[in-house]
Image (cartoon, helix red, strand yellow):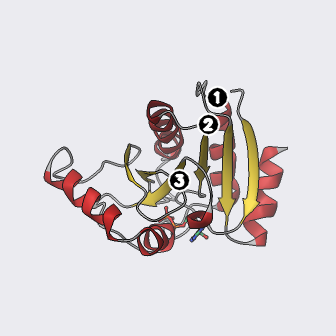
Amino acid sequence: MSARLVLVQGDITRQDVDAVVNAANSSLLGGGGVDGAIHRAGGPEILAACRALRASHYGRGLPTGQAVATTAGRLPARHVIHTVGPRWSATEDRSDLLASCYRESLRTAVELGARTVAFPAISTGIYGWPLDDGARIAVRTVRAEAAPGIEEIRFVVFDERAHEVFARALK
Ligand code: ADP
């Protein structure tokens, strides 16, 4: 990995990057958290593109750990990369699926020719993943990828606590 890793506290919908990653759910039809914010700020074009995906390749939805790109509508970004994080489970280790979200999203970004990519802390909201573990998996996974052409990977976290946790994981 030769990209620089950057941490910012803020709103992922406001990032001026080539591709923004959405913590989507498998329906691709919107939800809360990051997903809701992206659809609200990006407008109906994103939802239309997601509906088209449901009508074609992803009739049963996007499987957990995979990623797919659409237009970014009215967002400053050019693409939204939707990925479905696993729900946290106390009885089953789903870390590989969470790592897969970061890996597949980065791969998609490379395919799109993106140079800058913004990630939220996937699964750490509604899906309940402990923040410190989620941050560790995020940082470790993107560091292990070659990601040719990617110059900047930006982690965008909402609050101060998440900022502290990610800062520690990046050290
Ligand atoms: P998931 O369902 O994968 O857990 P969420 O969207 O609920 O996804 O939350 C993922 C993380 O993103 C949480 O840490 C949450 O605090 C944070 N978050 C929520 N909204 C935004 C936003 N607009 N920009 C950046 N981060 C956000």
First reached walking from the N terminus: tag 3 or tag 2: 3
| Mark identifier at residue 41 | none
> Which amino acid type is marked by label 3?
Val
Question: In the image, is the residue at mark 1 within 8 Å of ligand 1 by its beta carbon?
Answer: no
Q: Is residue 159 left or right of residue 81?
A: right
User: Does dot 2 land on a helix, a strand or a loop?
Assistant: helix
> For residue 111, which quarter of the picture?
top left
Residue 108 x, y percent position in the rendering: 44, 37
> Which amino acid type is marked by label 2?
Thr
| Mark identifier at residue 144 | 1
First reached walking from the N terminus: tag 3 or tag 1: 3
User: Where does label 3 land, which residue?
Assistant: 20
Image quarter for ligand 1 equals: bottom right
Residue in view at x 79 percent, y 45 percent: 170
Q: Residues within 10 Å of mark 2 (few under 14, many from 20)?
A: some
Q: Is residue 71 left or right of residue 22?
A: left
Q: How far apart, in angstroms, are the residues tagged by discs 3 and 2?
A: 17 Å
Residue in view at x 66 percent, y 43 percent: 153
The foreground one among 64 and 33 is: 33
Frontmost of labels 3 and 2 is 3
Question: In the image, is the residue at mark 3 within 8 Å of ligand 1 by its beta carbon?
Answer: no
Residue 141 x, y percent position in the rendering: 61, 36
Frontmost of labels 3 and 1 is 3
User: Where does label 2 land, which residue?
Assistant: 141
Q: Is residue 88 above or below residue 145?
A: below
Q: Is residue 5 above or below residue 24?
A: above
Q: Residues within 10 Å of mark 1 (few under 14, many from 20)?
A: few
The answer to whether the residues at label 2 and label 1 have Cβ atoms under 8 Å apart is yes
